[in-house]
Image (spheres, helix red, strand yellow):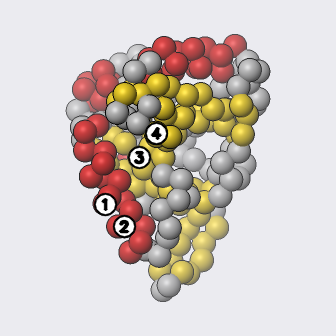
C-alpha cells in the first residue's frame, strides 16, 4: 500500500485487490461480497493480468452474457489461469451494441487478447437494480470531480450473478475509473 496527501486528503493506493473468501458462499455459486473492502478505495492494477472477451448488447442490455461468461471461465480454468484469492471481471460498454469484459487471470490464456490495465483505479460500490446504473454513473462522475479525479475508462464490476444477488438481498455493483 502506498499513502500520500492530495489536496489536504490522505490517500491510500492498494497494490492488491481484496481477498475473496470462496468459503463464504451460501449459494454454491457466487461468494458473499463485502463492499467495505472495495468502497471508495484506490487500487493499482499495474501487476494484474487480464483477458478480454466481448458480448453483444441491444441498447446496452446484454444478449449473450451467460454463454460468453461460461465459455470464458471454462477457458480460464482449462488454461490453469484462475486466480486463487482474487476475483474481478470489469465490464465496459463500447457502444449500445457491444460490451467488453476484462477477466482477471493469473497467466495468459490462449486464443484471448491478454492485456494489462495499468494505472490507479478509484472504486465506488453501489447496491440496487441494474436499471439504476446510468444514475450511479452520473453520481460517480460527480464524486470523482469533487475529489479532483478525471472519469476515464469507467468500468463496472458486477459482483454476483442475478440469482445470487437475489439470495443475498444485495446487488452490489462496483464502478471503477482510472
Residue 58 visible at all = yes
Q: Which residue is mark 1?
A: 139
Quadrant into which the C terminus falls: bottom right
> Which residue is label 4 attached to?
95
Sequence-first tag of 2 and 4? 4
Q: Earlier in the sequence, mark 3 or mark 2?
A: 2
State the image coordinates of residue 167 (x, y, percent, origin top left).
Answer: 26, 24
Q: Nearer the viewer, residue 24 or 82?
A: 82
Residue drawn at x 42%, y 60% is 40
The N terminus lies in quadrant:
bottom right
Task: Give the distance between the C-alpha atoms of the residues marked 1 and 3, in whole angstroms.
Answer: 13 Å
Q: Position of residue 28 (x, y in %)?
A: 41, 16
> How crowded is the residue under tag 1: few (<14 C-alpha within 10 Å), some, or many (20+)?
few
Q: Are marks 4 and 3 in contact (CB under 8 Å)?
A: no
Q: Are marks 2 and 1 in contact (CB under 8 Å)?
A: yes
Closest to the observer, 108 or 65 = 65
Helix, strand or loop at disc 2? helix
**Residue that numbered label 3 is attached to:** 174
Residue at the image position 48 percent from the left and 52 percent from the top: 154
Mark 4, secondary structure of its residue: strand
State left or right for residue 62 relative to residue 110: left
* SS for dot 1: helix
C-alpha separation, residue under disc 3 versus residue under disc 2: 14 Å
Q: Residues within 10 Å of mark 3 (few under 14, many from 20)?
A: many
Whole-number angstrom distance, CA of label 2 to CA of label 4: 24 Å
User: Label 1 near label 4: C-beta < 8 Å?
Assistant: no
Amino acid at each position: 500500500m502506498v499513502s500520500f496527501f492530495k489536496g489536504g486528503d490522505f490517500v491510500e493506493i492498494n497494490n492488491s485487490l481484496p481477498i475473496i473468501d470462496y468459503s463464504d458462499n451460501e449459494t454454491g455459486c457466487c461468494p458473499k461480497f463485502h463492499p467495505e473492502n472495495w468502497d471508495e478505495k484506490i487500487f493499482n492494477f499495474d501487476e494484474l493480468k487480464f483477458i478480454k472477451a466481448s458480448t453483444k448488447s441491444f441498447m446496452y442490455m446484454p444478449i449473450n452474457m451467460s454463454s460468453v461468461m461460461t465459455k470464458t471461465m471454462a477457458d480460464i480454468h482449462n488454461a490453469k489461469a484462475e486466480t486463487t484469492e482474487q476475483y474481478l471481471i470489469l465490464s465496459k460498454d463500447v457502444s449500445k451494441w457491444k460490451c467488453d469484459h476484462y477477466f482477471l487471470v493469473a497467466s495468459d490464456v490462449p486464443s484471448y487478447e491478454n492485456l494489462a490495465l495499468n494505472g490507479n483505479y478509484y472504486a465506488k460500490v453501489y447496491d440496487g437494480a441494474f436499471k439504476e446504473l446510468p444514475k450511479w454513473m452520473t453520481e460517480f462522475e460527480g464524486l470523482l470531480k469533487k475529489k479532483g479525479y478525471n472519469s476515464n475508462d469507467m468500468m463496472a464490476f458486477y459482483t454476483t450473478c442475478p440469482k445470487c444477488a437475489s439470495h443475498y438481498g444485495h446487488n452490489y455493483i462496483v464502478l471503477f475509473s482510472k
